[in-house]
Image (spheres, grey):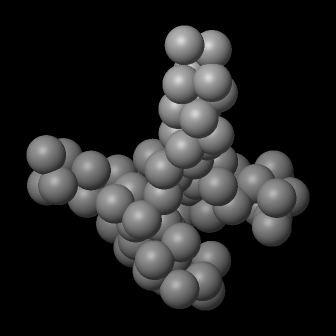
Amino acid sequence: MRAGLDLTGGLIVSERLRARFPREHLARAAEEVRATGTPLAGVLGVPPGLTDPARYTGAAARLTDRALERR
């Protein structure tokens, strides 16, 4: 599974960076990732952990808490 995620070069979690970068900037970065194979973190100059899917759970915790509250 990790190998499949790594094939995206970090693009799979690019929505996480939307608050930090304008959409156009992310779009250009995504094009560069696809064209060169450089990981998104390298293209954007951010720490690799920001584009590591294993370190990003998005809203999962909040959604889980909400679901458990309804029980």
Left or right of residue 47: residue 69? right
Most extreme residue toward the right is 22
Comparing 60 with 8, the one in front is 60
Query: Residue sitting at 69 percent across and 61 percent down?
Result: 17
Left or right of residue 64: residue 20? right
Most extreme residue toward the top is 71
Comparing 63 with 54, the one in front is 63
Comparing 71 with 8, the one in front is 71
Q: Residue 13 location in percent, x, y?
A: 51, 52
Residue 67 drawn above or below residue 23: above
Tell me the quarter of the picture where residue 2 sits: bottom left
Query: Residue sitting at 62 percent across and 77 percent down?
Result: 44
Q: Residue 8 location in percent, x, y?
A: 35, 51
Q: Residue 6 location in percent, x, y?
A: 25, 58
Query: Residue sitting at 64 percent across and 55 percent down?
Result: 16
Q: Let me know if residue 5 appears in the view.
A: yes
Q: Quadrant of the C terminus?
A: top right
Left or right of residue 23: residue 52? left
Residue 8 drawn above or below residue 51: above
Left or right of residue 33: residue 31? right
Q: Residue 24 location in percent, x, y?
A: 81, 53
Q: How many marks?
A: 0
Query: Residue sitting at 13 percent across and 55 percent down?
Result: 3
Tell me the quarter of the picture where residue 39 sits: bottom left
Q: Let me know if residue 10 appears in the view.
A: no
